[in-house]
Image (cartoon, grey):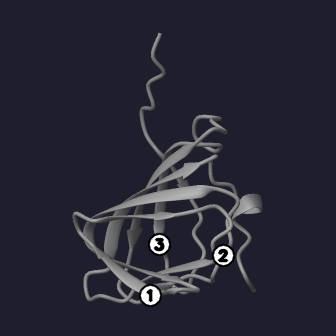
């Protein structure tokens, strides 16, 4: 029998401005530890602390632009593009563009505050 997820759960986001995280599948909404799937809505000017997560993160940008900064440089990922951040890679996300960004993030294993390892 399939498991139907009727609605996402809103998860508090880190960063300098309010960002909406709608978790559909993951530790919070479905009790799934193997992976998480969430839609993010970030306003213009949003930036979060750098992190070094214990999971691979696969991100598809639906609208706007997501800036991805790693130790190897910075890349702007625009609507229709995707990016993969590997477990243990230092990364910082931001949405400096005028329209912010909407994107879907898939984390394997599932995201949790204890495995993201954000910098102070």
Residue carrying label 2: 51
Q: Name the front one of labels 3 and 2.
A: 2
Q: What residue lies at 47% left-to-right and 9% top-to-bottom?
A: 1
Residue situated in front as seen by the camera: 77 or 29:
77
Task: Provide the secondary structure element on which disc 2 rests.
Answer: loop
Residue 6 location (% of width, % of height): 42, 32
- Alpha-carbon neighbours of circle 1 within 10 Å: few (<14), some, or many (≥20)? few
Q: Residue 74: which numbered mark, if any?
A: 1
**Quadrant location of residue 99?**
bottom left
Above or below for 39 versus 5: below
Q: Residue 7: which numbered mark, if any?
A: none
> What's the distance in space between the residues labelled 1 and 2, CA to CA?
15 Å
- Residue that protrudes farthest toward the front in the picture: 72
Residue situated in front as seen by the camera: 79 or 85:
85
Task: Provide the secondary structure element on which disc 3 rests.
Answer: loop
- Alpha-carbon neighbours of circle 2 within 10 Å: few (<14), some, or many (≥20)? some
Residue carrying label 3: 19
Q: Name the front one of labels 3 and 1.
A: 1
Q: What residue lies at 35% left-to-right and 85% top-to-bottom?
A: 44
Above or below for 60 versus 69: above
Q: What residue lies at 58% left-to-right and 77% top-to-bottom?
A: 91
Residue 97 location (% of width, % of height): 30, 88
Q: In which quarter of the image is the C terminus?
A: bottom right
Residue 7 location (% of width, % of height): 43, 39
- Residue that protrudes farthest toward the top in the picture: 1
> What's the distance in space between the residues labelled 3 and 2, CA to CA?
17 Å
Task: Provide the secondary structure element on which disc 1 rests.
Answer: strand
- Earlier along the polypeptide chain: callout 3 or callout 1? 3
Q: State yes or no: discs 3 and 2 in contact (Cβ < 8 Å).
A: no
């Amino acid at each position: 029998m399939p498991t139907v997820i009727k609605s996402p759960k809103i998860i508090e986001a880190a960063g300098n401005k309010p960002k909406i995280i709608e978790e559909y599948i993951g530790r919070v909404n479905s009790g799934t530890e193997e992976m998480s799937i969430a839609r993010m809505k970030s306003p213009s000017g949003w930036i979060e602390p750098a992190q070094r997560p214990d999971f691979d993160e696969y991100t598809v940008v639906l609208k706007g632009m997501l800036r991805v900064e790693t130790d190897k440089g910075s890349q702007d990922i625009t609507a229709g593009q995707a990016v993969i951040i590997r477990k243990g890679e230092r990364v910082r996300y931001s949405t400096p563009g005028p329209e912010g960004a909407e994107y879907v993030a898939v984390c394997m294993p599932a995201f949790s505050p204890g495995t993201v390892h954000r910098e102070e």
